Image (cartoon, helix red, strand yellow):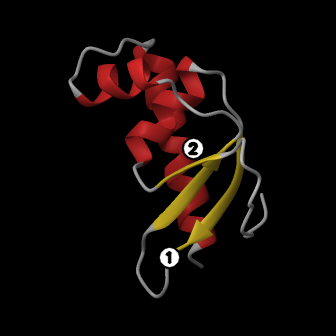
Amino acid sequence: MQRQELSNPTHYKTEKLTFAAYLIIALKADLVGIQPIGNSRNVIFILSKSPSSEQLTEFFNGSARVPALKYAEAINRLKSVAYEARR
């Protein structure tokens, strides 16, 4: 994974780790990049696919469903990638 800005219009960017993990599982999206935000510990996750408005609504109102173990694994992987990007 390289630290780079990707401007591909088909890519989706989010700062929310939990939402990125959800999209990786629900959409089978790939993490194509990560972009540190200034001097903070935050990063932007760049994914290969964009969510539909229905998926956005389901996630943010708490009704989205994905397998718990896969979701937990995706969260842990994203945490590791974010940590490495900030080093």
The residue positioned 66% from the left and 22% from the top of the image is: 28
Q: Is residue 68 above or below residue 76?
A: above
- Label 2's element? helix
Which residue occupies the extreme left position in the image? 61
Which percent across, then down, holds residue 22?
A: 46, 29
Residue 80 is marked as: none
Residue that carries the numbered disc 1 in the rendered image? 37
Tally of marks: 2
Few, some or many residues within 10 Å of mark 1 (<14, 14–19, 20+): few
Identify residue for label 2. Answer: 77
Quadrant for the C terminus, please.
bottom right
Q: Quadrant of residue 42?
A: bottom left
Tell me the kind of residue under disc 1: Ile
Residue in view at x 43 percent, y 13 percent: 66
Image side of residue 10 versus residue 57, left or right: right
Check disc 2 and give the amino acid type.
Arg
Image location of residue 15, percent across then percent down:
44, 56
- Measured along the vertical axis of the image, is residue 43 above or below residue 53? below
- Residue located 74% across and 61% down the image: 6
Q: Residues within 10 Å of mark 2 (few under 14, many from 20)?
A: few
Tell me the mark number nearer the camera, choosing from 2 and 1.
1
**Front-lying residue, 39 or 81:** 39
Q: Earlier in the sequence, mark 2 or mark 1?
A: 1
